[in-house]
Image (spheres, rainbow, N blue to C red):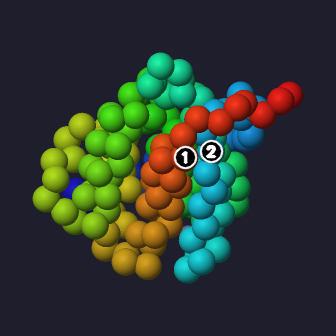
Amino acid sequence: MTELRELYQEVIIDHGRRPRNFGHLAEANRSAEGFNPLCGDRLTLYLRIEDGVIRVARFEGAGCAISTASASLMTEALRGKTEAEARALMDGFHALVTGGEAATADLGKLAVLGGVREFPTRIKCATLAWHTLRAALAGGDRPATPE
Ligand code: ZN
């Protein structure tokens, strides 16, 4: 378990320092902003959805290592997912970090963030990106921002 924990921490530190899919997405047709006042984490999520499938997910903002790593891992996981699959992932992730009963087997790399459930003040850091995703998916299509 200790080795697993260290591996998990390495993944979080890596994604916290070098977030994947970081930056503005001009061709986004969904976006939302998220803010976690407890920690000061801020992020904007951009999605390009075509035929109900998330083709591209990117984010930008500034936050702690946990919020950045969570957004980085989430954007990786969302690519190629349908909106329904993205919602299922969101529910699974929420169960993971709050200690719920839902199966977490198919969360893949996202499982590394399960450790935050031992640190209640950090749960909002880990879930910020996902709350923002919920808002982005609920937002409906809008014209892509002109270049
Ligand atoms: Zn935070």
- Which amino acid does the dot numbered 1 rest on? Gly
Identity of the residue drawn at 53% across and 21% down: 50
The relative height of residue 72 versus residue 54 in the rendered view (above or below) is below
Give the mark, 2 or 1, whose residue is nearer the N terminus: 2
Q: State the image coordinates of residue 116 (x, y, percent, origin top left).
A: 37, 67
Q: Secondary structure at mark 2?
A: strand
The relative height of residue 38 versus residue 97 in the rendered view (above or below) is below
Q: Disc 2, disc 1: CB below 8 Å?
A: yes
* Residue in front for this viewpoint, 138 or 67: 138
Q: State the image coordinates of residue 61 (x, y, percent, origin top left).
A: 70, 55
Q: State the image coordinates of residue 57 (x, y, percent, origin top left).
A: 57, 35
Identity of the residue drawn at 48% across and 47% down: 138
Q: Is residue 65 visible?
A: yes
The relative height of residue 142 versus residue 1 in the rendered view (above or below) is above
User: Mark 2 Cα within 10 Å, few/some/many (few <14, many 20+)?
Assistant: many
Residue position marked by numbered label 1 in the rendering: 139
Which quarter of the figure has residue 109? top left
Residue position marked by numbered label 2 in the rendering: 31
Q: In the figure, is residue 110 to the left or right of 65? A: left
The relative height of residue 145 versus residue 7 in the rendered view (above or below) is above
Spatial CA distance of label 2 from label 1 is 8 Å
Q: In the figure, is residue 92 to the left or right of 43? A: left
Question: Residue 123 got which mark?
Answer: none
Identity of the residue drawn at 78% across and 34% down: 145
- Which amino acid does the dot numbered 2 rest on? Ser
* Residue in front for this viewpoint, 93 or 19: 93
Q: State how many labels appear.
A: 2
Q: Quadrant of ligand 1?
A: bottom right
Q: Secondary structure at mark 1?
A: loop
